[in-house]
Image: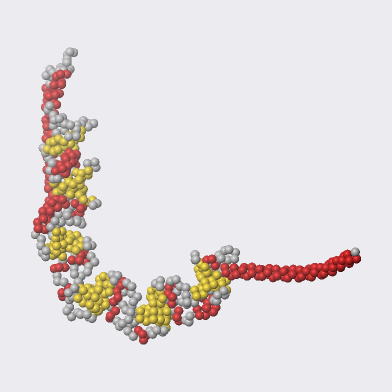
Amino acid sequence: MAKKQEAEKELAAKKAELQDTEDTLVKEKEDIESEADSKFMDEIKSTTWSTPDDDFDWDKDEKGFGNYSDEERAKLEDLYAGTFNSVNKGEIVQGTVVSINNKDVVLNIGFKSDGLVSLSEFRDTPDLKVGDVVDVFVESQEDANGQLVLSRKRAKTQKSWEEINEALENDTIIDGFVKSRTKGGLIVDIKGVEAFLPGSQIDIKPIRDYDIYVGKTMEFKVVKINHEFKNVVVSHKVLIEDDLENQKTEIVSKLEKGQVLEGTVKNITDFGVFIDLGGVDGLLHITDISWGRIEHPKEVLQLDQTVNVVVLDFDDEKKRIALGLKQLTEHPWESLDAALEVGSKVKGKIVTVADYGAFLEITPGVEGLIHVSEMSWSQNLRSPSEFLKVGDEIEAQILTLDRDERKMSLGIKQLTPDPWKNIAERYPIGSKQKAVVKNMTNFGVFVELEEGIDGLVHISDLSWSKKINHPNEFTKVGEELEVVVLELDEENRKLSLGHKQLEENPWDTFETIFTLDSIHQGTVIKVGEKGNIVSLPYGVEGFCPAKHSVKEDGSVLKLDETADFKIIEFNKDNKRVVISHSRIWEDQRAEARMEEFNNRKKEARAATSAVRKVKDSVEKSTLGDLDVLAQLKEQLEDEESAKKAKK
């Protein structure tokens, strides 16, 4: 703050001095003009005016000179022009400051007229004074008012562009002033030309606050120029990298495994931390930060923190260095309580949960695995996440302990009595029990009789009469279900249960009801491609094949339609009942055809009998006639024989 005030005072003093100088020059100019005016008036008064003659040559001056010839004028103009510098539009020339006022700076560049440059173009030179020499750009030899037009800003810009291009071609260092911050980097003023400094090119380490560089003059290297859009990209990082490359080679050449170094946390990632060792970076992997498990390095380290690390490994060619932090302290297994042994109880916090189990951290760096099978006496525990979660503080029992291999297995269920002891006494075969549905699969239902005692009710043991495709058609998770103990395997901890066994097998009764060719009324409850499922009396379901679902009018049975069905197959062992609706009307048609056939047959028999009777009567009549004729014939023959005898 004090420096700023001193600078302001110094600037005010210089402005006052400049104003005094300007006032002095103005006063001197007024004195000179006043003196000249007095002399001119004296000459007028002392001059004797005469009336000119008629032949007075008005083109001659008082010394008798008249008009110049063209040749003489050309020579004089050449001599006059030789006293001035040759100035062309678009070139850069040097000009001398003649005067300075509140708005403009008057410059003499050796041309026939002086040029004006706005005072605002000299803001970077507050000490500008009369007599100073500066570079200016000739924009025009004369404007509409005949004034020489100059620009210092364009001169600076053009000269800066030349220097910037030379810096890129020759790979030289150039100075620049950081003007402001922008998105993704900084704006740098290089002698009037604005250049862009990307954030990634400021330093070799990530920069979190760009504002600290604003207002500083720094060294840069030009890395890219776009001449079409007049864009310049510079880098300060390459200067540091060039210096660090030599330092890296020197540092790596002195590294040794096991060497302890001091470094600064440069960057933190999910997988580890980059440590600046004074010119070269080393990687501290997350697994080498702490003997205990950590989810992210930020739990232990912070940016810009100074830490001691040990060199674990390094690569001379690739200049890669592997560092360790936890190796500076003794392994927790070495200080593990010697009194701990198999069977001991320990307390800790769950740090990891996997598909096969969970890890319990007893002390940082000492963990034990609780396998999923050791979490509960229940056989129905499918995933550790159903029982434990990260952060849970629990107690467990040591099952195995290997201090040399630094491995430990733990169990939770061992802290409670084994429910499978004396299981046969509590759940004898044939006993009826109540259970809770815990889980369902395609093949059956898992139920829990008590904590740690699970059993399976196979899908075939759920119902005597209903055909169940999936257990969820019969029950739901969480519902209470009565069961009967069917089988018990204490050694393998398996329990087979049944639900339908609570009742007698109704199929023995169904066998007497649903006899072959018996007709029963049913309702279609499910329609399929191969056939329909029909609900019959007493809760029995029958299968009606598609070809047997055709009605007498040619249409097929629909869902929820009620009709009569004939039993065409009954299998008690497989609980299979096959029925037919078509068979009923087909049989009726067959019976009708048979009855018609029998009637026709009877009619035919009656007709045949009648014919026979007629035939018999006809035959008898015919034979009687034959006897009379025979007698008549004999009589005629006798008479003829008698006549012959007479003759």
The foreground one among 394 and 175 is 394
Whether residue 199 sits left or right of residue 430 in the image: it is left
The foreground one among 87 and 30 is 87
Q: Position of residue 519 (x, y in %)?
A: 57, 74
The reply to whether residue 24 is visible in this rendering is: no
Q: Quadrant of residue 520?
A: bottom right
Q: Is residue 438 above or below residue 112?
A: below
The foreground one among 424 and 559 is 424
Q: Quadrant of residue 523?
A: bottom right
Structure colour scheme: secondary structure
Q: How many marks?
A: 0
The foreground one among 639 and 164 is 639
Q: Position of residue 308 (x, y in %)?
A: 13, 65
The reply to whether residue 314 is visible in this rendering is: yes
Q: Position of residue 566 (x, y in %)?
A: 56, 72
Please tell me which residue is depicted at 74% across the width and 70% down the height of the picture.
612
Q: Position of residue 50 (x, y in %)?
A: 15, 17
Q: Is residue 472 above or below residue 162?
A: below
